[in-house]
Image (cartoon, rainbow, N blue to C red):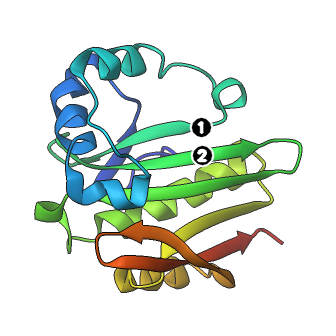
């Protein structure tokens, strides 16, 4: 079985055809609180981003996979970020579009990325930063044995005030 192909989804690189998908997703203000985005992205900026998405993770220190269903339609994204090959660690974050949530896509994507990072990037650990009130994400990461490592107090500012962010780690022993 291929590394980035699961039973119901596959993970693939960004393609030029993803411009509208990326534009809609990146400019959805409901996602901004978890991405630290504060202004909309233009199609021009996103087109340049896609054109440079071929950069190796060792060079860019990040990589974005598009999560596709069995019809090869994008249902979300899973990102590797803050890749530190010297320390063998990388952050992981994912987003499933609301209309595709509840289908197991996030779980399958996370499993594929864990396998990929440990086998192909030789990572010693993955980490995730999760808002303390994001119970679905907490449950997902705990399902894959990510362990609670600490709380960043008042880390995320929202229209309702400050939220804590939890650090989770999965260490490959």
Q: Where is mark 1, residue-wise?
A: 62
Mark 2 Cα-neighbour bin, 10 Å: few <14, some 14–19, many ≥20: many
Image coordinates for residue 1, horizontal then vertical, percent: 48, 48
Residue 172 versus residue 116 in the image, above or below:
below
Image coordinates for residue 9, horizontal then vertical, percent: 30, 53
Image coordinates for residue 50, horizontal then vertical, percent: 38, 21
- Quadrant for the C terminus, please: bottom right
In the image, taking residue 142 as reference, residue 106 lies left or right, namely left
Q: Pointers 2 and 1 in contact (CB under 8 A)? A: yes
**Which of 129/59 is in front?**
129
Which label is found at residue 141?
none
Image coordinates for residue 99, horizontal then vertical, percent: 10, 62
At horizontal 82% and vertical 51% (from top left) the residue drawn is 88
At horizontal 72% and vertical 29% (from top left) the residue drawn is 58
Q: Residue furthest right?
A: 86
**Which of 20/30 is in front?**
30
At horizontal 30% and vertical 39% (from top left) the residue drawn is 39
Residue 10 versus residue 127 in the image, above or below:
above
Q: Where is mark 2, residue-wise?
A: 81
Quadrant housing residue 91: bottom right
Is residue 137 at all visible to an observer of this figure? no
- Kindly state the secondary structure of the residue where label 2 is placed: strand
Is residue 34 at all visible to an observer of this figure? yes
Q: Earlier in the sequence, mark 2 or mark 1?
A: 1
In the image, taking residue 147 as reference, residue 8 lies left or right, namely left
Quadrant housing residue 34: bottom left
């Amino acid at each position: 079985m291929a590394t980035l192909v699961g039973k119901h989804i596959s993970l693939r690189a960004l393609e030029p055809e993803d411009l509208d998908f990326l534009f809609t997703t990146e400019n959805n203000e409901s996602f901004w609180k978890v991405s630290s985005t504060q202004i909309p992205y233009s199609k021009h900026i996103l087109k340049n981003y896609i054109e440079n998405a071929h950069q190796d993770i060792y060079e860019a220190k990040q990589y974005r996979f598009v999560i596709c269903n069995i019809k090869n339609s994008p249902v979300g994204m899973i990102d590797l970020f803050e890749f530190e090959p010297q320390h063998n660690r990388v952050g992981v974050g994912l987003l499933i579009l609301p209309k595709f949530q509840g289908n197991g896509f996030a779980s399958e994507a996370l499993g594929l990325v864990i396998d990929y990072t440990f086998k192909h990037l030789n990572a010693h650990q993955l980490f995730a930063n999760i808002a303390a009130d994001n119970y679905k994400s907490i449950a997902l990461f705990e399902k894959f044995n990510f362990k609670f490592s600490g709380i960043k107090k008042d880390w995320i500012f929202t229209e309702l005030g400050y939220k804590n962010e939890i650090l989770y780690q999965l260490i490959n022993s």
